[in-house]
Image: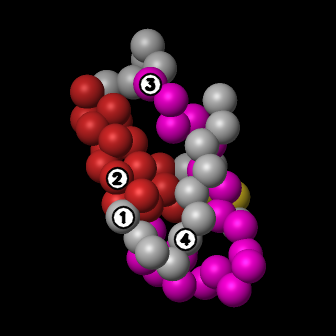
Amino acid sequence: MFADAWVGKYSYLEDTLNLLKLGGLYVIDDMLPQAIWSEDQASKASQLISRLECRSDLTLSKIN
């Protein structure tokens, strides 16, 4: 899966992750802070990363 929209990244995270099969990939782009982001968007990105880091059923890889 590739999350390239606000809804896929933030609004339905659990539903989206439940669709993953064992060994599946969930790719999220545009997670590094950007000058055009609102403060709200920066906060949501940080919270999403924290939520994913806490999961024991996922292996998280961050790539610049």
The residue tagged 2 is 50
Q: Tell me the quarter of the picture where residue 60 sits.
A: bottom right
Dot 1, how many residues are within 10 Å of its Cα: few (below 14), some (14-19), or many (20+)?
few
- Magenta part of the protein: which range? 12-33
Picture layout, residue 41 above or below residue 25: above
Marks 3 and 4 in Cβ contact (< 8 Å):
no
Amino acid type assigned to the residue bearing label 1 in the image:
Cys
Dot 2, how many residues are within 10 Å of its Cα: few (below 14), some (14-19), or many (20+)?
few
Task: Point out the tag, 2 or 4, that comes first from the N-terminus.
Answer: 2
- Name the residue nearer the viewer: 47 or 9: 47
Q: Could you tell me what secondary structure mostly forms the magenta stretch?
A: loop
Alpha carbon of mark 1 to alpha carbon of mark 3: how far? 21 Å
Can the viewer see residue 61? yes
User: What is the quadrant of the N terminus in the image?
Assistant: bottom right
Q: Is label 4 in a helix, a strand or a loop?
A: loop
Drawn side of residue 9 relative to residue 63, left or right: left
Q: Which mark is residue 58?
A: 4
Alpha carbon of mark 1 to alpha carbon of mark 2: how far? 6 Å
The residue tagged 1 is 54
- 16 within the magenta span: yes
Task: Point out the tag, 1 or 3, that comes first from the N-terminus.
Answer: 3
Q: Residue at x 25, y 27 (%)?
A: 39
Q: Residue at x 31, y 25 (%)?
A: 38
Dot 4, how many residues are within 10 Å of its Cα: few (below 14), some (14-19), or many (20+)?
some
Alpha carbon of mark 3 to alpha carbon of mark 4: how far? 23 Å
